[in-house]
Amino acid sequence: MTDVPEKKPSRIQTRNRRLILDSALDVFSRDGFGGATLDAIAKGAGLSKPNLLYYFEGKTEIYVTLLSQLLETWLDPLIELDPDGDPVEELLGYVRHKLDMALELPAESKLFAGEILQGAPVIAGYLKDDLKPLFDRKCVVIQDWIDTGRLAPVDPAHLIFSIWSTTQHYADFGTQVSALLDDKSPAKGAHNHLEQMFRRLLAPVNQ
């Protein structure tokens, strides 16, 4: 008996799934998982609730789908950190990439932050089984750069935490940043400041 090939979703089905996920991102990042409702997601997508439930079984499936897609995007820059590259430039490139993502994808950042603040009920397994091994490998890379004199002596784990916290601040606390900067875009100033700060921190002591 031959397997029946899986039917490819139609253009309308693909569009509607995208509308639902885009709406859900706005709702979850604003209201959190507990405060989000299927009615609000359906309304934002311009669909009826029964139509939404044709594509997803419920709120949890939508939330898990969003987080799964986000984690792939969020961790790509860390995965791409090249052990054979120039250590300072590799890390500064990572800072720039993370900041660009925070500025361009603030709702995604808030969604991830909200999940973590709730104790990671959905992605706890992912943090342990996927993120932890990746994190440990990159800490080894950074420590090797330090041991070979190509990077200033820093704590690799806390360096990565510092990069995450300083870049994602511009998304997770975007309302505060906007108010304090009188609604001016923080992009240029943030890029310049973080590059200067991390370059000074990371430059080898013999330079």
Image: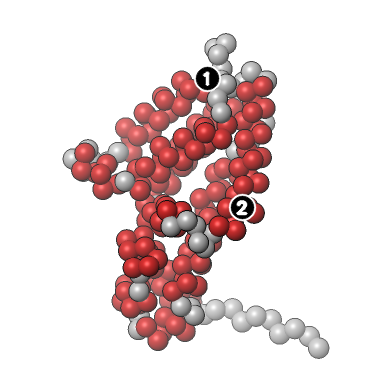
Q: What's the residue at 47%, 36% (across, down)? A: 163
Q: What's the residue at 43%, 47% (across, down)? A: 101
In the structure shown, which secondary structural element does the residue marked by tag 2 occupy? helix
Which of the marked residues, 2 or 1, is nearer the chain's N terminus? 2
Give the position of the C terminus as an image quadrant. top right
Query: Type of residue at label 1?
Result: Ala
Q: What's the residue at 67%, 27% (across, down)? A: 144
Q: Nearer the viewer, residue 149 or 118?
A: 118
- Percent x, y for residue 184? 23, 40
Q: Mark 1 sits on what residue?
A: 203
Mark seen at residue 167: none
Crowd class of label 2 (few under 14; some 14 to 19; many from 20; radius 10 Å): few
Is the Cβ of the residue at disc 2 closer than 8 Å to that at disc 1? no
The answer to whether 65 is drawn above or below residue 152 in the figure is below
In the structure shown, which secondary structural element does the residue marked by tag 1 occupy? loop
Q: Mark 2 sits on what residue?
A: 128
Q: What's the residue at 30%, 38% (across, down)? A: 186
Q: Most extreme residue toward the front, as rendered?
A: 119
- Percent x, y for residue 179? 20, 43
Query: Type of residue at label 2?
Result: Lys
Q: Most extreme residue toward the top, as rendered?
A: 206
**Would residue 207 be found to the left or right of residue 138 on screen?**
left
Distance of label 2 from label 1 (alpha carbons): 32 Å
Q: How many marks?
A: 2
The answer to whether 46 is drawn above or below residue 185 in the figure is below
Give the position of the N terminus as an image quadrant. bottom right
Tell me which corner region of the image, top left, top right, bottom left or bottom right, holds residue 137: top right
Q: Nearer the viewer, residue 77 or 140?
A: 140
